[in-house]
Image (cartoon, rainbow, N blue to C red):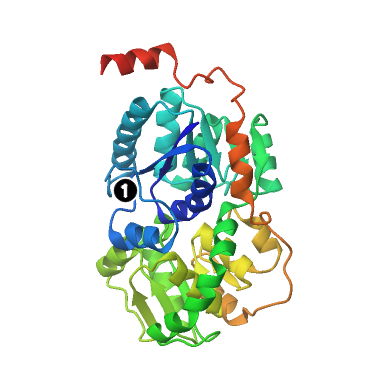
């Protein structure tokens, strides 16, 4: 079996690590990096910090408007699909790379498997919400992290090909735990931090970076916190901070983006995590670290219901109060599986898709290939 896997952003690199390892033990995988996260700090360092194979194809799309970026990815992914004629296209999450991959595969009559299917924020102003909804409705195999995700799909009339596998990010965290724990002392020393005496902050979503008022509010909250704040800055955020001239307090340390192991070492040692990242919300829960989510809603509602995650939006008072009241608690219920999600993906991919796309390409697509 041949699978084309499309990734383009840091969370997808993490998710693909576990699944690629399981796939390549029995099948052929062509790993396509769209280049959505295109510089070394946002991309290469993450490949180095994980056991993910080097990409077979890099589309080098880079930054741009949503339409321009998605269009460039769509063309590049289509070229790969026409050349490789895979049995499946595998995509992850909710980025523009996810959307482009799903659209390209649907046009080329390649069955789509979507890992992390069924998530919903119910906020259609989020580009990520549009991406995930479209990908789910185009997919043949929908691999869900939770019962909630399955119920979301059922509410939209999607029941065929839906499976709960858990969250592949937990697979990676568990397998990486020894390296993370071994790295933590040196990572903290390098940043001049002490365990449980600092916050980690990340901001990257367009709702926060592209709205000067929200961004200023977030920085204002960080400036008011009582402990050091380590803020690995996404390039989009750094550009927005510079354009807005935000005043950064001396205890807020702007750092370059870091690799997976270093980020998890910092997160596991922090007093709390302040983030608009979906992945970090889950990782905070699994690590037993309180999380303050810098959004008005979240797809990962189970972490909120558990009491480990507080939705604070961009209101400084709410953020500061949530961060100051955060503390490590007792045992946590198991959420999003048992760390064996990747092992469940492969047998499901090995089943013949129950659709007319079984052959991989229809007659129209074969004519396109022959014409080239």
Residue 84 appears in which quarter of the rendering?
top left
Name the residue at 51% across, 49% down. Answer: 21
Q: Is residue 127 left or right of residue 35?
A: right
Q: Is residue 234 left or right of residue 329?
A: left
Name the residue at 49% across, 74% down. Answer: 265
Name the residue at 40% across, 52% down. Answer: 9
Closest to the observer, 219 or 267: 267
- Would you place residue 284 above or below residue 342 in this image? below
Is residue 93 among what the camera can see? no
Q: Position of residue 165 (x, y in %)?
A: 65, 46
Q: How many marks?
A: 1
Q: Position of residue 161 (x, y in %)?
A: 64, 31
Q: Residues within 10 Å of mark 1 (few under 14, many from 20)?
A: many
Q: Position of residue 305 (x, y in %)?
A: 70, 62
- Would you place residue 102 above or below residue 266 in this image? above
Q: Which residue is mark 1?
A: 35
Name the residue at 66% across, 54% down. Answer: 336
- Pick out the residue farthest to the front: 25
Closest to the observer, 112 or 152: 112
Is residue 178 among what the camera can see? yes
Residue 339 appears in which quarter of the rendering?
bottom right
Q: Position of residue 69 (x, y in %)?
A: 31, 42
Give the secondary structure at mark 1: loop
Pick the quarter of the image with the C terminus.
Answer: top left
């Amino acid at each position: 079996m041949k699978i084309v896997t499309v990734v383009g952003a840091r969370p997808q690199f993490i998710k693909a690590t576990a699944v690629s390892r399981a796939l390549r033990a029995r099948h052929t995988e062509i790993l396509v990096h769209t280049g959505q996260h295109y510089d070394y700090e946002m991309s290469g360092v993450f490949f180095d910090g994980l056991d993910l194979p080097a990409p077979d194809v890099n589309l080098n799309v880079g930054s741009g408007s949503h339409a321009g970026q998605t269009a460039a990815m769509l063309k590049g992914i289509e070229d790969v699909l026409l050349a490789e004629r895979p049995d499946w296209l595998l995509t992850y999450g909710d980025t523009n790379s996810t959307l482009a991959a799903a659209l390209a595969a649907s046009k080329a009559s390649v069955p789509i498997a979507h890992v992390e299917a069924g998530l919903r924020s119910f906020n259609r102003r989020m580009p990520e919400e549009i991406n995930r909804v479209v990908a789910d409705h185009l997919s043949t195999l929908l691999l869900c992290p939770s019962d909630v995700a399955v119920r979301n799909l059922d509410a939209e009339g999607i029941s065929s090909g839906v499976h709960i596998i858990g969250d592949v990010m937990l697979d990676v965290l568990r397998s990486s735990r020894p390296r993370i724990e071994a790295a933590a002392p040196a990572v903290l020393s390098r940043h001049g931090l002490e365990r449980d005496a600092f916050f980690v902050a990340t901001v990257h979503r367009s709702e926060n970076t592209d709205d000067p008022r929200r961004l200023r509010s977030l920085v204002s909250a960080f400036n008011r916190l009582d402990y050091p704040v380590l803020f690995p800055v996404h390039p989009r955020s750094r550009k927005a901070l510079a354009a807005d001239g935000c005043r950064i307090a001396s205890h807020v340390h702007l750092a370059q983006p870091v690799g997976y192991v270093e980020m998890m070492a910092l997160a596991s040692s922090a007093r709390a995590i302040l983030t608009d990242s979906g992945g970090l919300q889950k990782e905070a829960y699994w690590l037993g670290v309180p999380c303050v989510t810098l959004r008005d809603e979240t797809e990962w509602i189970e972490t909120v219901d558990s009491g480990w995650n507080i939705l604070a939006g961009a209101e400084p008072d709410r953020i500061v109060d949530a961060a100051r009241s955060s503390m490590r608690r007792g045992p946590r219920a198991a959420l999003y599986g048992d760390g064996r999600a990747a092992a469940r993906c492969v047998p499901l991919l090995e089943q013949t898709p129950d659709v007319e796309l079984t052959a991989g390409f229809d007659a129209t697509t074969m004519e396109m290939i022959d014409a080239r």
